[in-house]
């Protein structure tokens, strides 16, 4: 049984840690920008209900928002067994900035995918592009337990420029000793709105970092997270819990600089 949100809350109360597959379309010409120069956007409750175990071509967004480095739309989802947590807050629960809770506590502002579940998100104003180093950050709600282990629940990350051809980052969800290399959901999240920690700086933000060069893709407009099936399941909070995405190296749709 996955008690990620409950464990996260328990850790918070106990430890007092309150920090704070055709070829892809060509990349437009223009300069790569550091998304850290863009303004953060807030997260609101959309109040939209969806049923677990269903698949949808969601096509939902949070309405008009300023250009920012965060996901803008949920385009598809398919929830697995033991999903449910966060579905009443779709789509906004996974749009906008991460709400990290620090090293010893996991955010409750997340969407649980359930066993083998998936969600696909789209960037509509600022795309991730292959630049120097890390290009994309994925934020889950991993946290450090008493005793030193990280409570991690993993997902495979796939990226696409056109939503048709997908590129999968290798993910070893069985290698606990190695830190589940290539998987999302393995690092605590330190950035949250208002705490001064940039959500686009991989050296301080936390979350899991991905470089598009590792899969040979020059630009990504879509990101798909798929629960690996090797996590804890039970109740309505099973599996990988998505908080947010952020672009580190980004470019506007027209190739310009915001």
Image (spheres, rainbow, N blue to C red):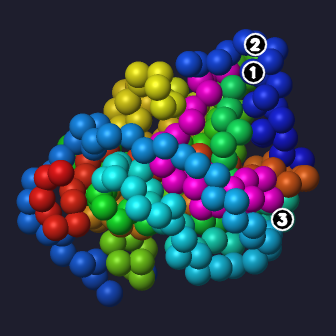
> Local crowd at mark 2 within 10 Å, few (<14), some, or many (≥20)?
few
Q: Nearer the viewer, mark 3 or mark 1?
A: 1
Q: Are marks 2 and 3 in contact (CB under 8 Å)?
A: no
Residue 188: quadrant of the picture: top right
Please give the residue where the numbered disc 3 appears in the rendered image.
Answer: 81
Closer to the camera in the image, 249 or 168: 249
Q: Are marks 1 and 2 in contact (CB under 8 Å)?
A: yes
Q: Is residue 101 left or right of residue 86?
A: left
Q: Nearer the viewer, residue 187 or 12?
A: 12
**Residue 125: horizontal and vertical position, in percent?**
31, 61
Q: Nearer the viewer, mark 2 or mark 3?
A: 2
| Magenta stretch in the rendered image | 84-104
Q: Is residue 37 visible?
A: yes
Q: CA distance from mark 2 to mark 3?
A: 31 Å
Q: Is residue 2 above or below residue 143?
A: below
The mark found on residue 15 in the picture is 2
SS state under label 3: loop
Residue 55 sits inside the magenta stretch: no
Q: Sequence-wise, which precedes: disc 3 or disc 1?
A: 1
Residue 19 in picture, x, y percent from top left:
58, 19
| Residue 84 coordinates in the image, percent (x, y) | 80, 59
């Amino acid at each position: 049984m996955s008690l990620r949100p409950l464990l996260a809350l328990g850790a918070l109360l106990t430890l007092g840690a309150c920090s704070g597959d055709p070829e892809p379309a060509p990349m437009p010409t223009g300069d790569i920008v550091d998304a850290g120069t863009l303004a953060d956007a807030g997260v609101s409750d959309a109040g939209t209900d969806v049923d677990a175990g269903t698949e949808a071509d969601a096509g939902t967004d949070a309405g008009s928002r300023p250009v920012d480095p965060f996901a803008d739309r949920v385009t598809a989802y398919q929830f697995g067994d033991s999903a449910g947590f966060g579905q009443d807050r779709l789509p906004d629960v996974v749009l906008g900035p991460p709400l990290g809770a620090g090293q010893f506590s996991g955010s409750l502002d997340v969407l649980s995918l359930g066993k083998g579940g998936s969600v696909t998100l789209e960037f509509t104003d600022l795309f991730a592009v292959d630049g120097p180093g890390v290009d994309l950050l994925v934020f889950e709600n991993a946290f450090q337990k008493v005793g030193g282990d990280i409570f991690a629940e993993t997902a495979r990350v796939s990226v696409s420029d056109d939503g048709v051809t997908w590129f999968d980052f290798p993910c070893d969800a069985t290698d606990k000793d190695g830190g589940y290399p290539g998987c999302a959901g393995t690092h605590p999240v330190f950035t949250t709105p208002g705490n001064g920690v940039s959500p686009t700086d991989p050296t301080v933000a936390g979350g899991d970092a991905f470089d598009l060069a590792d899969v040979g893709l020059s630009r990504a407009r879509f990101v798909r997270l798929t629960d690996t099936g090797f996590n804890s399941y039970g109740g309505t909070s099973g599996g990988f819990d998505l908080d947010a995405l952020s672009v580190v190296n980004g470019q506007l749709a027209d190739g310009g600089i915001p």
